[in-house]
Amino acid sequence: MKHGTLTAYAKHGCRCEPCRAASARASKAWRRDNYLGIVKLVDAQPLKDHVAMLMAAGMSFRAISLTAGYTSRNALADSMTRSRVRPATLARILAVNPKRDNRRDAYIDATGSRRRLQALAVNGWSTRSLATQLGHKHATTVQDIASGKTPTIRLRSMDAIRDVYERLWDQPGPSKRTADIAKAKGWLPALAWDDDLIDRPEHEAEDVRRRGVSGGGSGITLEDIEEAREQGYQSAREIGWRLGVSRDAVSQILSRSDRVAS
């Protein structure tokens, strides 16, 4: 407790000379401002309405608090219980914007980042490898985002994950074990998501299953293989990775095509 403050006088009941003097100064200042018509508190309803809008947009109460510059949610929770708040408090809450033009320290829904990390895992990029590229010391940070344990992340983290995703989404990673585990969990590849909608929680994945081929079983066609070759994938393994099938399935289609041509 710090003596000589209104807090010590009002909350802690200290009646030492410095605390009584602080209380007297505060009382005098309040009477002066009241006489002059100076308003130091404003209606708290706009603050409550804005918080409700932010939460409807997908931000958690904790994310709003941290984005507004509070170290915890307690200060904002206290403001939500009041009918009047300081103008500065109202201004800092109204400055929180769910759009991407907000501060890079803002917290934002992690749905899109989770989907991107899962898609990269399906490609064979391990959590440790992605953590290194994202500049994280601990792979658990990335793992928690990918698994959904972290519902909100900072905007700058989302940007970093997007950059890595844009660079690697169509590149096979070095870990087949990671890819197998990701597929076993039901995680979806990049082709399942619309780039413009991947960050929206309500967006549903597209059906990326192939249209099938008579007697093939793998669901790919020779046209699919040729398209993959045009995109730069040459070996049966690379083409199979691009189309989501095994190398043997690609070889089978090519072999059948060669027999028909001969």
Image (tube, rainbow, N blue to C red):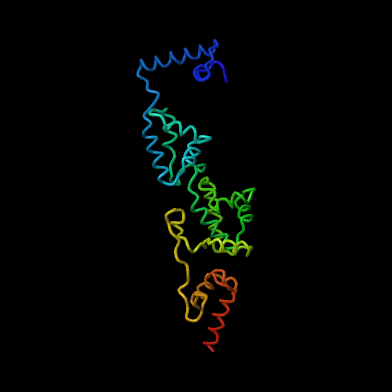
Looking at the image, which residue sits at the far bottom? 262
Is 126 on the left or on the right of 158, as rendered?
right
Q: Identify the residue at the far top of this view.
A: 17
Q: Which residue is drawn at 57% across and 50% down?
A: 144
Give percent across and percent down for residue 95.
43, 37
Quarter that holds the N terminus: top right
Q: Position of residue 103 (x, y in %)?
A: 49, 41
Number of numbered markers: 0
Relative height, residue 248 to residue 105 (above, below): below
Q: Is residue 125 above or below residue 89?
A: below
Residue drawn at (52%, 87%) of the image? 260
- Quarter of the image that includes the C terminus: bottom right
Residue plotted at (56% across, 16% down): 3
Task: Give the image quarter of residue 79.
Answer: top left
Using the image as rendered, state which of residue 150 and residue 26 is in the foreground. Answer: 150
- Residue 234 location (% of width, % of height): 58, 73
Q: Is residue 84 left or right of residue 161?
A: left
Q: Position of residue 85 (x, y in %)?
A: 41, 28
The quadrant holding residue 125 is bottom right
